[in-house]
Image: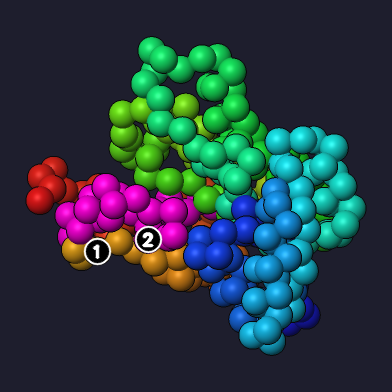
Amino acid sequence: MAQRRVLVTGAGAPGGIGIAVARALAAAGDAVAICATSARIHDRAAELRAEGLDVTAHIADLTDPAQVLQLRDAVGPVSVLVNNAGMGSLSQPAEQTAFTDLTEDGWLRAVDVSLHTAFRVTHAFLPAMLAAGFGRVVMMASVTGPRVSNPGEAAYSAAKAGMVGLTHALALEVARQGVTVNAVAPGWIATEASTPEELRAAAATPPGRAGTPAEVAACVRFLASAEAAYVNGTTLVVDGGNTLQERKA
């Protein structure tokens, strides 16, 4: 099969899910473009290229529609889009705020970062997939929102639940044109951004540990594959079974 072009958004963190997804897809033979809001994305690309992988880096603020279109022009048509950007970035860190203390600006900013970015990027890149008769769109959702939530995360929860709703609607619209749209919903995943509280919560999961970015990336790699042609509109939960248990240690 000819080498595919891939875009993974939100891949700037050195130990994050985005870079793990980029590594997994590039290792499978894809030519991968990665983007983030800061120049550190060039460091991530250099690390992957040092592993012999075909990776290019792009800086883009996906809350800016003009920059999304510039990214599309720079990257060109892709066969696989992984909407990993969201939750927070170096320029706009995620915040936990009680709903009664949440301002409208704070609400809109959180939803913009975690949901509207996926809308903008998909809207920009999807037409070329439809024209080619093949495409894979993978949304990086979360168990937070669609399945569970935490105090102070009303906006983030609403955004991630909205991402799953977007996945469902798009999957129905584009399936007959050879494009699938699916979501991955991670639970507690150990990254350099994990707090001690989050790692303690992960220790109460059925496996007794947090997941790894590579384990999430493996699920994305499957959904992006040709073999996953009949998997459409689904949300693949990657949480070690944590949302199944009523009692947590």
Quadrant for the N terminus in the image: bottom right
- Residue 72 placement, left or right of 185: right
Question: Which quadrant of the view contains residue 41?
Answer: bottom right
Q: Are marks 2 and 1 in contact (CB under 8 Å)?
A: yes
Q: Residue at x 36, y 21 (%)?
A: 98
Q: Position of residue 31 (x, y in %)?
A: 74, 74
- Residue 171 placement, left or right of 67: left
Asked if residue 40 is positioned above or below residue 2 in the image, the reply reads above
Asked if residue 98 is positioned above or below residue 186 in the image, the reply reads above
Q: Nearer the viewer, residue 146 or 129?
A: 146
Q: Residue at x 13, y 48 (%)?
A: 248
Which residue corresponds to mark 1? 209
Q: Is residue 95 magenta?
A: no
Amino acid carrying label 1: it is Arg
Which residue corresponds to mark 2? 190
Q: Position of residue 115 (x, y in %)?
A: 59, 36
* C-alpha gap between disc 2 and disc 1: 9 Å
**Sequence-first disc among 2 and 1:** 2
- How is the rendered protein coloured? rainbow
Asked if residue 224 is positioned above or below residue 106 in the image, the reply reads below
Q: Is residue 210 shown to the viewer in this render?
A: yes
Q: Position of residue 181 (x, y in %)?
A: 60, 51
Which residues are the magenta region? Answer: 180-206
Q: Is residue 200 magenta?
A: yes
Amino acid carrying label 2: it is Ala
Q: Position of residue 97 (x, y in %)?
A: 40, 25
- Badge 1: how crowded within 10 Å, few (<14), some, or many (20+)? some
Q: Nearer the viewer, residue 223 or 82?
A: 82
Label 1 sits on a secondary structure element that is loop
Q: Residue furthest bottom?
A: 52
